[in-house]
Image: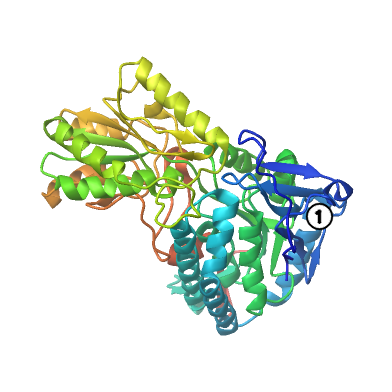
Amino acid sequence: MFWKKKSKHASTNDMRANEPETRGASRNDQEDKLSLYNVSLRIGADDVPSSDRKTLSRVGPVTGDVVTTVAAAGVSDVNSAIESAHKAYQTWSQTGPNHRREILLKAADIIQSKAAQFSAIVMAETGATKMWGGFNAKLGAEIMREAAAMTTRLLGETIPADRPGTLSMAIRKPVGVMVGIAPWNAPVILGVRAVAMPIACGNTVVMKASESCPMTHRLIVDCLIEAGLPEGVCNFISHDPADAPQIVEALVTHPLVKRVNFTGSTKVGKIIAAHAAKDLKPVLLELGGKAPFIVLDDANLDEAVRAAAFGAFMNQGQICMSTERIIVAESVADEFVSKLKAKVESFKTGNPAEDGVQIGGVVDIRTIGHVESLVADAEQNSASIVLRGAANGAIMSPNLVDKVTQDMRLWSEESFGPIVCVARARDDDHAVELANDTEYGLSAAVFGSDISRAMEVANAIESGICHINGPTVFDEAQMPFGGVKASGYGRFGGTFGVDQFTEVKWMTINSKPLKYPL
């Protein structure tokens, strides 16, 4: 096993919530800091410590306990993992599609069988609710199954050629070593997505775990190994947050790495893209969001309220697709806000380990401070604070802010926490104008009874995803998932993902002697 559970662990309940969520130390320094799990790097066939024996402790945001002690890799470990993946590629790229499918399907079953374990680990590392952890395992397994279905969908085509006797073909083939970098907020879903499709297409992978959920991400790799994935096909790297810049640069710029996929912040996405651009290396980026949710004057308000509340506060608003800006027609705005307030007040906030809790902890105390600063700025600029969230450590009840204007920070800054704002629109054109007033363009939603009208509004929104009469938070494994503008480029999911993780090669076969002008 990649991790070993200790017989007991030191209580650290007296730690303050504003202390760092991760702690780096040498191996000797860690000997008297007993954690719940120890997590190793995975390089080739071996579970190994970092080359300098450095480790990192992940502190649970809700309990304040050390929940994970993980190996903190250096650049030499990165290089070893990439070289391992390169060696494995020579064989894996030649492995038949049905064998690759068999392994991935088995891995999906294993992930699903470990749903309770994933849920407990996600809750401990990120503060999320049991429901969110369980849902992550379910959709993670579905993403793995969808990748398995794509092993026989690396399709090419024959193309008519003007030259007589020439058979012209476009063939699709794997690329080589890829890097997958996943975030903490939907750790199983996005962790699986970072590696499953590249592996299905015949590539090998180095997965860089999030510093906030290394144990969750390592368990995904362990499920693949248990399913029979050959050594070196999926390697695992974790690191100290302080070392992130050099680790990421080493991963992206290594000459054996052919492509990179990254899900995370726009700030880091730009850094990765800049590193990759030096070698014209393709990257797939799914970045930040500030999702608009438009409510037209003919919308079913009860349904719109249910969708908006779910989209804004599922996983405490820490989803890239989270509803952050609700744009409501002026004529129905007061009624909508009143209904939304009642709905949000019905949510149970508390320790995610307790039964029935719907709003759990955020990933770290900095999120609480950020949300509070957004509320304070909005209030100073005459917004109406409908619900002011109460904070207890890393747990915060929902915030609802009405009559937000474009000059407030809450309007433009990604909040990524338990808060949503409401703005009023004069008409449909104004609603679209407000929706597009953002650097981001990932997900959006439009609610209205006249579908033709709602379609027209949806088509005018600058986003990679838009749902009519549905929440901004929605995903299925086979769908083209990705954004525009500062939300990134490229698409995960189904055959769209195949395009990202393969190369198209033009080949010809000539059955007749050719004539040359020279």
Q: Residue drawn at (11%, 31%), measured in percent from left and top?
A: 331
Could you say which is closer to the camera, residue 509 or residue 353? 353
Instruction: Please say whether residue 34 is visible from this viewpoint.
Output: yes
Q: Quadrant of the C terminus?
A: bottom right
Which residue matches tag 1?
77
Residue 75's place in the image compared with 94, above or below, is above
Which quadrant holds residue 215?
Answer: bottom right
Residue 443's place in the image compared with 160, above or below, is above
Please state which amino acid type lies under the numbered disc 1. Asp
Residue 500 horizontal side relative to residue 447, left or right: right
Q: Residue drawn at (25%, 49%), measured in percent from left and top?
A: 306
Within 10 angstroms of label 1, few (less than 14), some, or many (20 or more) residues? many
State the image coordinates of residue 314 (x, y, percent, origin top left): 39, 49
Residue 56 horizontal side relative to residue 467, left or right: right
State the image coordinates of residue 487 (x, y, percent, origin top left): 46, 42
Residue 219's place in the image compared with 213, above or below, is below
State the image coordinates of residue 462 (x, y, percent, origin top left): 33, 40
